[in-house]
Image (spheres, grey):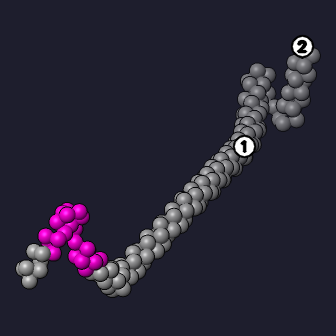
Amino acid sequence: MNAVLLTHFAASSSGIGALGFSGQAFLIQLITFVLAYLVLRHYAFGPILKVMQQRRETIEASVKLAEQLRKEQVELEEKVEKTLHETRQKADGIIAEAQDAARQTIRDGEEKARAKSAGILAEADSRIIQDTARARKKLEKELVGLIADTTEAIIDEKVDVKKDAQLIERALKQRQAV
């Protein structure tokens, strides 16, 4: 066998054979490559391509889902912002209403206090007028008694009520004339 190889090597020592190229070896390597390719295509490339396709589909679905979630997040953030804005406006409205109600309550209380103080002042004025009238009547009685006593002392006679009234009227007329 060595001899066959040597003769074959010696025969092909010129031309392409000189470069170490053997047609038979090339043919065997080509057949081995084709067989290996077919086996790999049938048993390895198919499942590998199938797994890669599944991964591609999974990645695309994940990307679509991520985009959808981003859109939903933006919409949700806008909705939350809108709801917060509406809530703030409602809260401001409630606060304004409460302040208005408080102001109105204060005004009503002030009005009631004014009315009550006016009633108290009117009652006090009425009492003052009544007390003044009582004091005047009392003073008039005392004054009439004093005048009667003074008149008795001056004219040395007992003055009765009739005579006293005549004297008082005369004195008042004289005073009004002056």
Q: CA distance from mark 1 to mark 2?
A: 42 Å
Q: Secondary structure at mark 2?
A: loop
Residue plotted at (87% across, 23% down): 172
Q: Is residue 113 above or below residue 147?
A: below
Residue 120 is at least partly visible in this image: no
The image quarter in which residue 82 lies: bottom right
Say if the magenta span includes residue 53. no
Q: Which mark is residue 105?
A: none
Residue plotted at (68% across, 46% down): 107
Q: Which quadrant of the rendered structure holds the N terminus? A: bottom left
Say if the magenta span includes residue 16. yes
Residue kind at label 1, given as amino acid type: Ala
Residue kind at label 2, given as amino acid type: Val
Q: Is residue 2 left or right of residue 18?
A: left
Q: Depth-wise, is mark 1 or mark 2 nearer the camera?
A: 1
**Local crowd size for mark 2, using a 10 Å CA cut-off: few (<14), some (14–19), many (≥20):** few
Pinpoint residue 83: horizontal percent, then vertical percent: 59, 60
In the image shown, does 85 or 62 lie closer to the viewer?
62
Q: Secondary structure at mark 1?
A: helix
In the image shown, does 72 or 77 lie closer to the viewer?
72
- Residue bearing mark 2: 178
| Stretch of the chain drawn in magenta | 8-30
Q: Is residue 70 left or right of residue 178?
A: left
Pinpoint residue 122: horizontal percent, then vertical percent: 74, 43
Pinpoint residue 123: horizontal percent, then vertical percent: 72, 45
**Which residue reaches farthest left?**
2
Q: Which mark is residue 118?
A: 1
